[in-house]
Image (tube, grey):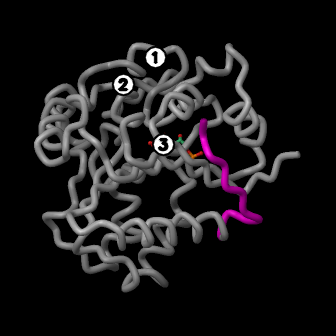
């Protein structure tokens, strides 16, 4: 069952996510494995991390991965890595070897295999599945998460850590973390803001059988330890 945490504004939600990350980092004596998502929701978060929190997060202990990446160059405005680099990575002192970007410019199938090996070799394996300490996931207005879109059911149980997926409307190829890895995380945090997602938040907390088929809701409900940080108070 996902544990909801509601906040009054997107800013307070991002602040709470950040403080929670700092708290979790404090408890960990070994390197901390974090995977972040893309899209627009984390922009506020990344800007906070690159400015007021630049010296308040122990970056040297944090290994940064991505939940998914668009198959574009890192300089492309659509790049999840490029977006975080501009808002945060260029402004903080994080060891370059701690940044494990997905190479969106590489041939997709080769990159999905390469990144799968990188993650499988660096992270502790639990039941043969790499376990992140924290995954920050988003949820699209169609109920997708990572780049697992509605109907791409096989990716919810896919054994490979990362695979190539495709955006159903634009056809854009993505490198996507698969369902079992998201569900295995020590903490899977859905960071969701915006009134347009209010119905989906309600569904995430109290899903119908039909809604449980949506990737974000399926994963939230089958995850070992899922939390929701959102700014959408629901009656
Ligand atoms: C991506 C993201 C994706 C995102 C959702 C929510 O690459 O687009 O990883 O899974 O989290 O689409 O996007 P917004 O935050 O823009 O609503």
Residue placed under numbered mark 3 in the picture: 225
Residue 99 horizontal side relative to residue 44, left or right: left
Of tags 1 and 2, the one toward the viewer is 1
Q: Does ligand 1 reach within 8 Å of label 1's beta carbon?
A: no
Which mark is in front, 1 or 3?
Answer: 3
Which residue extends farthest right?
235
Q: Give the range drawn in magenta.
A: 1-11
Residue 107's spot in the image, x, y percent? 17, 31
Is 71 rendered above or below residue 35? above
Q: Which residue is drawn at 62% across and 21% down?
A: 212
In the image, 202: left or right of 118?
Answer: right
Q: In which quarter of the image is residue 199?
A: top right
Give residue 58's position: percent from left, percent from top.
31, 77
Q: Nearer the viewer, mark 3 or mark 2?
A: 3
Residue designated by label 1: 152
SS type, badge 2: strand
The residue lying at 52 percent from left, 58 percent from top is: 42
Q: Name the residue under label 2.
A: 165
Q: In this view, does 104 lie above or below 32?
A: above
């Amino acid at each position: 069952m996902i544990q909801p945490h509601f906040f009054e504004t997107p800013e307070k939600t991002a602040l709470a996510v950040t403080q929670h990350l700092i708290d979790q980092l404090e408890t960990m004596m070994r390197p901390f494995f974090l995977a972040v998502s893309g899209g627009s929701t984390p922009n506020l978060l990344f800007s906070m991390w690159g400015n007021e929190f630049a010296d308040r997060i122990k970056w040297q202990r944090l290994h940064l991965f991505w939940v998914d990446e668009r198959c574009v160059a890192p300089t492309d405005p659509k790049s999840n890595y490029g977006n975080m680099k501009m808002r945060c990575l260029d402004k903080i002192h994080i060891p370059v070897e701690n940044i494990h970007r997905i190479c969106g410019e590489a041939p997709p199938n080769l990159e999905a295999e390469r990144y799968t090996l990188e993650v499988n070799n660096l992270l502790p394996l639990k039941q043969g599945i790499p376990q992140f300490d924290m995954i920050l996931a988003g949820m699209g207005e169609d109920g997708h998460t990572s780049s697992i879109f509605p109907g791409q059911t096989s990716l919810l149980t896919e054994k490979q850590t990362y695979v190539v997926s495709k955006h159903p409307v634009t056809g854009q190829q993505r490198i996507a973390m698969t369902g079992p890895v998201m569900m295995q995380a020590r903490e899977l945090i859905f960071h969701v803001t915006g009134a347009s997602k209010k119905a989906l938040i309600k569904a995430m907390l109290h899903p119908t059988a039909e809604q449980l088929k949506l990737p974000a809701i399926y994963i939230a409900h089958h995850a070992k330890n899922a939390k929701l940080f959102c700014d959408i108070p629901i009656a």
